[in-house]
Amino acid sequence: MVPPVDNLIHALSKLPGLGRRSAERAALALLRKPELLLDTLVAALQEARATVCCCTVCGGFTAREQDPCGLCADTSRDGTLLCVVEEPSDIFAIERSGGYRGRYHALMGKLSPARQTGPADLRLRALVGRIERGGVEEVLLALSTDMEGDATAGYISELLGPLGVRVTRLAFGLPADSGVGYSDPLTLKRAISGRIACS
């Protein structure tokens, strides 16, 4: 394959969710219609590179001229509730649900010995600082349910314990429109232990 095409495929394959074959299809589609797709993508990437940064308060994505971000600046949001997420993209997912009106804090990862990510690599000092400044009554940990997410949740819970805030975690259970027979044992176990009363 032509080296520039191979370089494009290699670069695209580093994106989450794109394997080698998907990256190859995307690269060839971009090159087939450069003025329609490739030029637009290059312009959007350059604009994002020049104008997007992480909010200095929550760590979510924002425009450089709007820091802190719109969510942090919104006075109608509940400042007593702070949702801790692993990545800025998790903030988008929670906002799409429409079920949360508090504030956010992105850690920029999770504890992972395999990736050599320790407490110093996460935005934990900033999290503690936000709690110490006062006003936060509950910290909701919206972290993944894998071993690393569980370890991160345990670490944060111990870290924040002496600060007098309530630390909670997202409920675990069956996905919407899913059956018991399609669920893995761990999800079922968590769904049973986190069961709620019928009203």
Image (cartoon, helix red, strand yellow):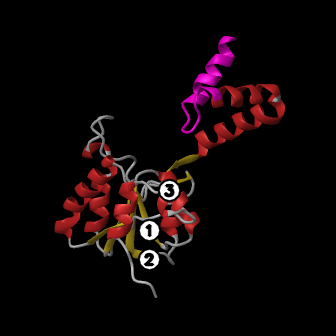
Distance between the alpha carbons at the discs numbered 1 and 2: 7 Å
Distance between the alpha carbons at the discs numbered 3 and 2: 37 Å
Tell me which corner region of the image, top left, top right, bottom left or bottom right, holds residue 113.
Answer: top left
Query: Label 3 neighbourhood size at 10 Å, few (<14), some (14-19), many (20+)?
Result: few
Query: Label 2 neighbourhood size at 10 Å, few (<14), some (14-19), many (20+)?
Result: some
Q: Which residue is mark 2?
A: 78
State the image coordinates of residue 25 (x, y, percent, origin top left). Answer: 70, 29
CB of mark 3 within 8 Å of CB of mark 1? no
Give the residue at x 80% y 29%.
34
CB of mark 1 within 8 Å of CB of mark 2? yes
Would you say the magenta stretch is mainly helix, strand or loop?
A: helix
State the image coordinates of residue 174 (x, y, percent, origin top left). Answer: 47, 64
Point out the residue furthest to the top here: 2
Instruction: Decide if residue 54 is in sight here.
Output: yes
Q: Is residue 23 left or right of residue 161?
A: right
* Mark closer to the chain start, 3 or 1: 1
State the image coordinates of residue 133 (x, y, percent, origin top left). Answer: 28, 69
Give the residue at x 65% y 41%.
47
Distance between the alpha carbons at the discs numbered 3 and 1: 34 Å
Mark 1 element type? strand
Query: Depth check: 18 or 91 in front?
Result: 18
Q: Which residue is mark 1?
A: 103
State the image coordinates of residue 53 (x, y, percent, origin top left). Answer: 52, 47
Query: Label 1 neighbourhood size at 10 Å, few (<14), some (14-19), many (20+)?
Result: many
Mark 2 element type? strand
Q: Can you say whether 69 is above or below 78 in the image?
A: above
Query: Depth check: 162 or 126 in front?
Result: 162
What residue type is disc 2 on? Asp
